[in-house]
Amino acid sequence: MCPWSGRTTLGMSTNAVFSLQNQSTAVASGGKIPVEHLDYDYIETCKDVKYLERILKVLRSGEEGIYPPLIKFCETHLEKLDPRSRALRKENYAATAAKDEWSQIIDELKMWQRETKNIEISLRQQSLFDDLVNRNMPPIRGSNCSVPLNQTSHSKGKGSSSKCTLPRDYREWDKFDVEKESERIDGNVVNNSPPATINTGHPKIQIKVDASLLTQQEKFLLANHEKDKGNEAFRANDYEEAVAYYSRSLSIIPTVAAYNNRAQAELNLKHWHNAMRDCQSVLKLEPGNMKALLRRATVHKHMGNVQLAAEDLRTVLMKEPQNAAATQLLSEVEKKLKECQLQRQSKGRKIFIQEVEEEDDKSDNETKAEQTVCPVDPSQQVRGEESSAAPVERGDMGNAQKKPHGRGDGRPHSESSNSHQRSKGGSAEKYKGTQESNEKLANGTSKSDSTTSAQADQSSSGKGTLVGGVAGEAVNLDAPCGALPPPLARLKNEGNQLFKNGQFANALEKYSHAIQGYTDSGIDSPEDLCILYSNRAACYLKDGNCQECIQDCTSALELQPFSLKPLLRRAMAYESLERYRTAYVDYKTVLQIDISVRAAHDSINRITRLLIEQDGPEWREKLPEIPAVPLSAQQHHREEPPSAEVLQAQAEKTARDAERKAEAHFTALKQEGNDFVKKGQYQNALGKYTECLKLKPEECAIYTNRALCYLKLERFSEAKQDCDAALKLEPTNKKAFYRRALANKGLKDYLACSSDLHEVLQQDPSVQEAEKELEEVTVLLRQSLATASPAQPRKTVPITEVESDEETTAVPNSESSFIGEDVAVNLRPTNAYEFGQALNAACCSRNTAACADLLASTAPDKLPQYLSTKLDGHAISFIMEALDSHLLEKDPSLVYQHLSYLHTAERFSVVLMLLEKDERHRMTQLFEHLSAVESTEYTKNDVQNLAKKYI
Amino acid sequence: MSSPLSKPQIIAHIQKSLNYTVFDSKWIPCSAKFVCMGNFPKGTGVMQIYEIQHGEAQLIQQVEKPKPIKCGTFGATSLQQRHIATGNFDGNLNIWNLEMPEVPVYTVKAHKEIVNCIDGVGGLGIGDGAPEIVTGSRDGTVKVWDPRQKDSPVANMEPVEGETKRDCWTVAFGHAINDQDRCVCAGYDNGDIKLFDLRNMSVRWETNIKNGICCVEFDRKDIIMNKLVATSLEGKFHVFDMRTQHPSKGFASVSEKAHKSTIWQVRHLPQNRDIFMTTGGAGTLHLWKYEYPAQRSKKDSDGVDVGVAGSVNLLQNVTLSTQPIASLDWSPDKQGLCVCSGFDQSVRVLIVTKLNVL
């Protein structure tokens, strides 16, 4: 008989509607299956899985007779349609393995038993050190915190609880009909509700495990466990999480497998440098490790080192000629190489004018900008690349042909051809890529401003030809480069081309020649020399010669301080040399110059983490000083409309070309000035800046800087003068406005101060300091107006933060100290503002008498209006106190009237709720006193009714 | 379905009949030994230690206790000590040194009624932070204990006075990713699932799946909450994707029906968090694999992230007995080795093959 009868298609009866898509003779829902459907032909043509399941159920039940071949046929057909159909699940009995397999299993098991025995013994021997372990444990959680079960983070939870069924009596379970129950529930998936959180906080994972107190045995187990976690995260495409777990594993015991897997995860994240580092670590531990070589080849390929990639791949194939992944990758790499060579041999079918700068910058930035952009949208690529020369596009062809892969199923431990795959989860990455390329474009354009105009013309004409699709067929190797004489320019252009082709060593040679020629010829064009050095540094960086790279960058920077690319390259070189602190400083400087350099952001994040790991929370203290970048060298983000500052900077640049020598002196002076400012020696800085201004009276930044010094030295009027000068030069300078505001504040000209601050905020609403300052000043302004206190001669007021009117009692501030007892409280308020000021003043000095006077002079019906939104707990309790202590004995009926109006004030009920205990107590007292006083105006009942509104 | 040879097979390696009702069985970490806990017909409790030797389970130790022992865990002990924490019918939480099991090293009257379930974290290198044990009881409370603190729990999750007390059938730790973060999930007889955040001491999420929750387990305790499996009385289980919590929809889930009877327990493979075994009331075991969707979250119509549940695939199933299999434990050390005990008064050691190729 059929052993499955009755358990086949659960949930069938709940399926109300059956429609046979390919049968016109639809069967009534839930009706019996006609006998003629139990037929080979019918079953064969039937495409409705549910209906087939029903047929199978009938057949298995034997109601219409038992036909084993038909059952079999039906099952196979159903499996074809839906291999996961529940009706196909059969009951299995415990399997028995084949003889040889079984013996293998048993052998394995025996071996494991022996091993664990050893492990156990070693563990037991070490248990003497238990105390040590305990010492290292985190503290006990706070004792006995109670969490009420009904506390729901979301109101909707109540809806669900009202629906929930009553629990069954324990006896009732005996009669529990699972089948019926499950059928009833079948089909509706219950998903419930609360707050929105995405649990992907991998930064929350500590990437280091303190395993110092563990035994070797435990460390081994732990490291393995963490690696397993990493593998699981990797399989779920959570590469960043996987990296975190691998790092944990490595922090316990560094193993080849964990390094290798982390390299793969980093590859998938497109963190080429990290991947490279991991591959190198593996190869250090185990030279010739296949996976590491293959992964390093992938990294090389992505970083543009095609030759190195090919080398690695050949090593792999030598050892493992069958390795499909390596073969495929090699063919790709070779294609790329050939293209490069082709380009070189055919001597330039493309125009080539732009500096290497742009291109290599991109490849520095992990080549991903172009690599990812091209498969997504070819048009995007054209847009993104048009400013850089066409060969880039050519170089990408190999990639463009690669189709985006369906799913990043690469596993860290399998060698499948995943190494270059793009994971699905990488879509964000792609986006980032595009964005980056756009930003690069932005940098490119802004950069071209800095190159000489001749070059700019060239590039624009080149762009023109490209866009026109003519693709100018001759490489313009003789294109003039800045002030370089033709032979040097040629050398440089050749170098650029070689660099783009990935022949870094050759490019290096060209640049070196160019530099040599430059020094020989004695031309005076530091800008060009700087570029040459910078380009040569890029070559060194590519070749992994970090020391030389740093040297070249430093030379370049001596020629042109704060130029972006040499700084960025030096930072990268420092980073590869693991000199993280200096790298950090350089990256920071880069960001000061141009905030939009994403590579610098990424690296800073990475380095910060590393440094925190290395130096603990005080890592910042160990950093060398970060030089402040002069405003003129700062580039602004492209999204903003080119601000006056940028224009100014550019104007300065052209001017600088003319008088470079004076400039150098000037820059030095300015730098010294800036240094003094940083050290807090404002007097010295002042001198330097003054000298600067002698050289260049038109320098706005110097004026603002000097203004800062004056401010710090509390010479406000001079500061104001400087700001005025700066604003004359540059009528929209934010800093000048801001500093003038501070100067005005110091001069106690609050009105001018606030108008300056308004100007700042109008220009840039995000300046928080200005906002804060404005808040303070507004308060000061009011105070000065309200108190109308004749300005006593006083030196600077140490201004502490004044939160807002409401909290003045809570925050004892310097204002209250000089308002004092004898403060002139405006006793005849005519509007809400004056009333508020007066109340506030009284409140600050705890002057209840003044408050009482104030209240006495205020019409009760106006009270709510005056208080308006200013009402708070302190004010209420203060008013109560004043009423109680002063006004009650004089005029109880007025007190009553005030009280009967007070509760109609805005926000009254809210404030009432927030009152503290003693404040409530005071209120109750007041009402007690009030009811004790006899009056004709009101009765005790009235008071009681009123009290109800308060208490 | 794929060819039978490439599928994992569940092989019954050892079967041992016992003279008592066994409630729970647990591997001793880093050993080939396991502990069985239960009660003798005369009403006393028992704890036995077996070791696998030469294809047999050898009894190496037996201790009798006054009260039946319902559940046990090694989750909060160090690899060196390997003390087992147990909960008994009397509501006591005890921690035993298995070398000297006569006197508990820690004991506390944890609950007024039977301790139904227990779980531990912070030991064995699983989960950073303090070692903690959580117990759930028929008295409706869920309490978290630190073995270093006597007498009182470090956290107590109880119904507000006057509210109906729900029988807590299952508890599980999760999200123990650093010293502070930690979650406890509890399942109740009325189908409530509650997720407590021990860092914030608040209920983070709750839902109801209409039928009593027999077992909940996170796929891993020491990673950012990833998946939670909840099994229920009527033979259904739900897999929740715990990565994306929607403000109103909560966690996305997929449900699957199996076993035609109560699913007593679910246990994830320690070596692969996406594979888990469920044990059924009719003596069946089902081995499942969770497949992630292509995207684990998407934006709903309001632009809020909402999780996307994957799917579950049945890898293998097996019927061992006609009585429920009430407990199952994977060996943390040897992949594919597991011990299960049922109400037919027997304990079985199973081997699941080909798990490494999944």
Image (tube, coloured by chain):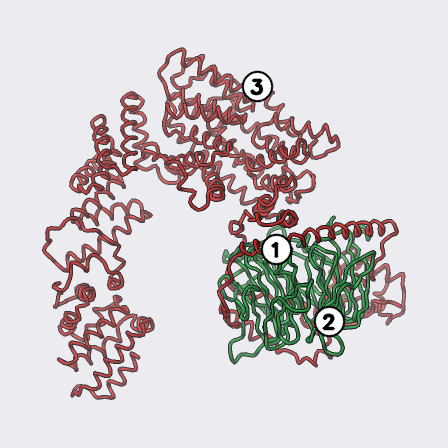
Which of the image's four quarters has the N terminus of chain A? Answer: bottom right
Q: Chain of mark 3?
A: A
Residue A665 appears in view:
yes
At x 76%, y 68%, the residue is: B342
Circle 3: is it few (<14), some (14-19), or many (20+) Cα within 10 Å?
Answer: some
| Tint applied to chain A in the drawing | red
| Tint applied to chain B in the drawing | green
Q: CA distance from mark 1 to mark 3?
A: 58 Å
Identified by mark 3, the residue type is Arg
Q: Nearer the viewer, mark 1 or mark 3?
A: 1
Q: CA distance from mark 3 to mark 2?
A: 74 Å
SS at badge 2: loop
Q: Are marks 3 and 2 in contact (CB under 8 Å)?
A: no
Circle 2: is it few (<14), some (14-19), or many (20+) Cα within 10 Å?
Answer: some
Relative image position of residue A740 (x, y in whole percent):
21, 43
Identified by mark 1, the residue type is Ile
Relative image position of residue B229 (x, y in whole percent):
64, 62
Identified by mark 2, the residue type is Ser
From what the image shows, is residue A801 above or below residue A363?
A: below
Circle 1: is it few (<14), some (14-19), or many (20+) Cα within 10 Å?
Answer: many
Residue at the spot of label 1: B126
Label ID, residue A344 = 3
In the rendered structure, the answer to whether residue B323 lies left or right of residue A122 reads right
From what the image shows, is residue A715 above or below residue A338?
A: below
In the rendered structure, the answer to whether residue A152 lies left or right of residue A233 reads left
